[in-house]
Image (tube, helix red, strand yellow):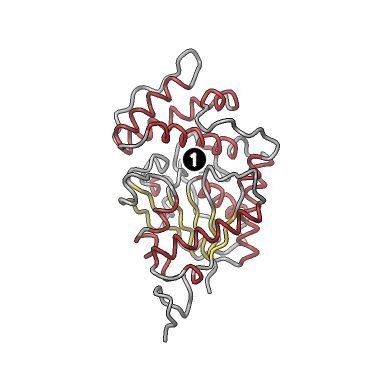
Amino acid sequence: MTAFVAVHGVGHYRSALSPADIVTARSAAWAKDLAAGLGTAAEHVPVTYAYYAHHLHHGRPVAQGSEDLDQLEREHPHLAEDITHWAKSLDESLGLRLPPPATAQGRLAVPLRQLVSAISEHLSLDGRLTRAFIATFFRDVTRYLSGPDDAARAAAREEVAGVISSTGARVVIAHSLGSVVAYEALHAHPELEVDLLLTLGSPLALRHGVFDRLSPAPLAGTGERPAGVRRWVNVADHGDIVAVPRPLKQRFPAVNLDLTGSIAPFDFHRVAPYLRSSVVAATLAPYLIKHTDVRGTDAA
């Protein structure tokens, strides 16, 4: 049996639940979604959820609303610059023809509303939900990448490495910000040997906001594959506003396979459509269970 470890993305902090309860519930949810794509039963997908969000929120006040962009800017005064670079990447990758993302009177909210409107119109998305998602994404990413020696960042990284080690997992599936955490965790622990690193909707190549803050730092504009990773496959929905710029392989040439396709045209970044997709199923099927085929029957 090949154990899988799932590394979640943004927006998964739940203050009312214990980490153990979240791990149990989300492990089951990921197994169910992966099983749907693989055409097997959930019990045949041995996945353990690596929950790290509580480390990023430890000692911090709970946000009063995911759409409170003014509060987000107060928490992170330099966030406008990150959003500016992200908007440029969107223009280059998706051809959105976005309005200039300059700030107004030092405030982030006005230009971001303009960007959200353009993104929502181009991708036929709900503006309010897109606004909420962007606020959540940048809040969590900024908290994780606040500094190379930040205690929360180190704790999140060690949490993921600990789950990989304790489960003996040979496959790591990392979504969104989770791809950044998993990438750094595997670099920090080269003794962890992984047959497959599968990144989904990854922002690893996003200049300034993510790429230039990675640990270890990229050399000459190039990020390296962690030493213990045998194979790295990246999958991005062509409309995913987080997985930019593309292709990822341009910044990480050691990626073995870099795929862009239509995963969920109106559900651009959630993990479930990725996990249920045929491309993820085809990638994971060879690693599933040694003597069990993807229909859940014993192989001869």
- Of 290 and 28, nearer the camera is 28
Could you tell whether 104 is left or right of 126 in the image?
A: right
Q: Total of numbered circles in the picture?
A: 1
Q: Position of residue 103 (x, y in %)?
A: 45, 18
- Dividing the picture into quarters, in which one does residue 215 lie? top right
Q: Position of residue 296 (x, y in %)?
A: 43, 76
Could you tell whether 24 is left or right of 43 in the image?
A: right
Could you tell whether 110 is left or right of 92 in the image?
A: right
- In the picture, the quarter occupied by the C terminus is bottom left
Which residue is painted at 38% across and 27% down in the image? 115
| Residue that protrudes farthest toward the top in the picture | 105
Number of other residues with Cα within 10 Å of mark 1, as a class: few under 14, some 14 to 19, many 20 or more: some
Q: Position of residue 177 (x, y in %)?
A: 51, 45
- Dividing the picture into quarters, in which one does residue 206 lie? top left
The correct choice, above or below, for 244 with respect to 175 in the image is above
- Of 87 and 111, nearer the camera is 111
- Of 82 and 104, nearer the camera is 104
Which residue is painted at 55% across and 56% down in the image? 26
| Residue that protrudes farthest toward the front in the picture | 16
- Callout 1: helix, strand or loop? helix
The correct choice, above or below, for 25 with respect to 221 in the image is below
The residue type indicated by label 1 comes to: Phe
Q: Position of residue 60 (x, y in %)?
A: 67, 34
Which residue is painted at 29% across and 34% down in the image? 122
Q: Circle 1 is placed at which residue position?
A: 211
